[in-house]
Image: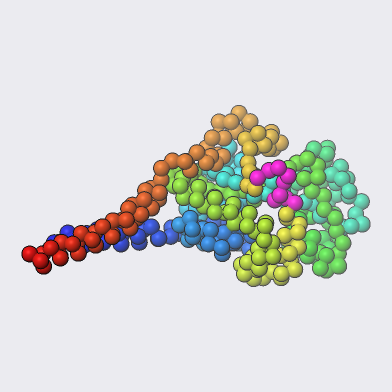
């Protein structure tokens, strides 16, 4: 008799574990905006929850965005970063690229509409905002490929780049195509953008990534998070009005009009004809390595641990076994009740 309720105890334990959500943190590379809409939709529509995940989406600190450190230090399990992740991997950082949300980089040079800068070669002797060789390295590369000696370019060193750009104190500002140009237009300043994408430098951007430890020891959780995130992005792209409303809930400091402009400007960088959302190819990463003058042999040495593979998704998982155990328990309950009642009746008859 003392073991009569053991199956119920097992069932309650299994059910509790089956419905427990695993806490996960996603570290963004910037503040909340449409750039991350797919993750917001994955959370709001319950895609993460369906995958058994309780996801906390953390914006970056404007003056200290360091998403890679947050992931490598264990403060977050996932992050969003730039194509410079390949160089950092080859330098020894155990980073794993999971999906490229942007098939092209949204970083551009912004110049005044009446500027005489139309092409990369026109940057000769022009004063530029700064030279970023990690974030936005493709902007520097675009100038170098046009024959510009960037070491000789005068660099702006002020603390208020937008204000000083508007005042004409320098010629070209590195921008995110959906942000600074809009701010200038709102102030009545007409601008143009010169973007790497227009000159054949289509490097990946906004790459979802994790650490090698998380990827190695929690492959099923990584697969579920990646799948739910891409599902969120697909939903966002197919339901833009709803995506804007949900993004506004997160991006409280931005107007709906500002977010709508971001969506309009970023969609061409996310969508690419014939390429599935989030797709990454070994050939394209090799091309990026060559583009950035990285060690191609080193890339081939690291590619199997650097690039996500969905092979693990076909393996028998503990979560699947747990679900099976719960299902079996549910099937056993009626049988258990029948046996208990039947035994009780027989005992009363006897």
Residue 163 image point, x, y percent: 79, 65
| Residue at x 79% of width, y 60% of height | 181
* Residue 291 visible to the viewer: yes
Q: Which residues are magenta?
A: 268-276
Q: Is residue 241 left or right of residue 350?
A: right
Marker count (numbered): 0
Depth check, front residue: 136 or 214: 214
Depth check, front residue: 261 or 165: 261
| Residue at x 46% of width, y 50% of height | 221
Q: Main secondary structure of the magenta part?
A: loop
Depth check, front residue: 301 or 304: 304
Compared with 297, 124 (above or below) is: below
Q: Quadrant of the C terminus?
A: bottom left
Depth check, front residue: 258 or 185: 258
Residue 269 image point, x, y percent: 73, 50
Image quadrant assignment for residue 168: bottom right
Residue 227 image point, x, y percent: 54, 50
């Amino acid at each position: 008799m003392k073991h009569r309720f053991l199956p119920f105890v097992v069932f309650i334990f299994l059910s509790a574990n089956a419905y427990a959500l695993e806490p996960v943190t996603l570290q963004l590379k910037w503040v909340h905006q449409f750039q991350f809409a797919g993750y917001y939709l994955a959370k709001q529509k319950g895609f993460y929850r369906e995958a058994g995940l309780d996801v906390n989406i953390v914006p970056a600190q404007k003056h200290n965005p360091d998403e890679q450190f947050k992931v490598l230090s264990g403060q977050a399990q996932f992050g969003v970063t730039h194509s410079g992740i390949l160089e950092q991997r080859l330098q020894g950082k155990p980073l794993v690229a999971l999906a490229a949300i942007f098939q092209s980089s949204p970083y551009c040079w912004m110049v005044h509409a009446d500027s005489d800068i139309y092409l990369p070669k026109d940057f000769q002797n022009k004063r530029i905002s700064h030279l970023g060789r990690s974030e936005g390295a493709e902007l520097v590369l675009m100038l170098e490929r046009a024959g510009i000696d960037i070491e000789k370019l005068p660099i702006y060193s002020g603390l208020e780049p937008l204000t000083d750009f508007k005042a004409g104190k320098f010629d070209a500002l590195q921008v995110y195509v959906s942000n600074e140009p809009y701010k200038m237009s709102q102030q009545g300043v007409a601008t143009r953008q010169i973007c790497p994408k227009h000159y054949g430098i289509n490097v990946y951007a906004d790459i979802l990534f994790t650490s090698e430890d998380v990827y190695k020891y929690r492959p099923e959780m990584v697969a579920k998070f990646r799948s739910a995130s891409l599902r969120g992005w697909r939903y966002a792209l197919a339901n833009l009005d709803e995506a804007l409303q949900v993004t506004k809930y997160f991006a409280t400091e931005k107007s709906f009009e500002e977010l709508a402009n971001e969506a309009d400007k970023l969609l061409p960088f996310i969508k690419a004809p014939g390429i599935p959302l989030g797709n990454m190819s070994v050939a394209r990463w090799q091309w990026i390595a060559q583009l950035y003058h990285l060690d191609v042999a080193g890339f081939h040495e690291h590619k199997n641990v650097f690039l996500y593979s969905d092979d693990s998704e076909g393996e028998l998982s503990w979560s699947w076994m747990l679900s099976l155990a719960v299902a079996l328990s549910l099937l056993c309950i009626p049988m258990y009740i029948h046996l208990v009642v039947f035994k009780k009746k027989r005992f009363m008859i006897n």
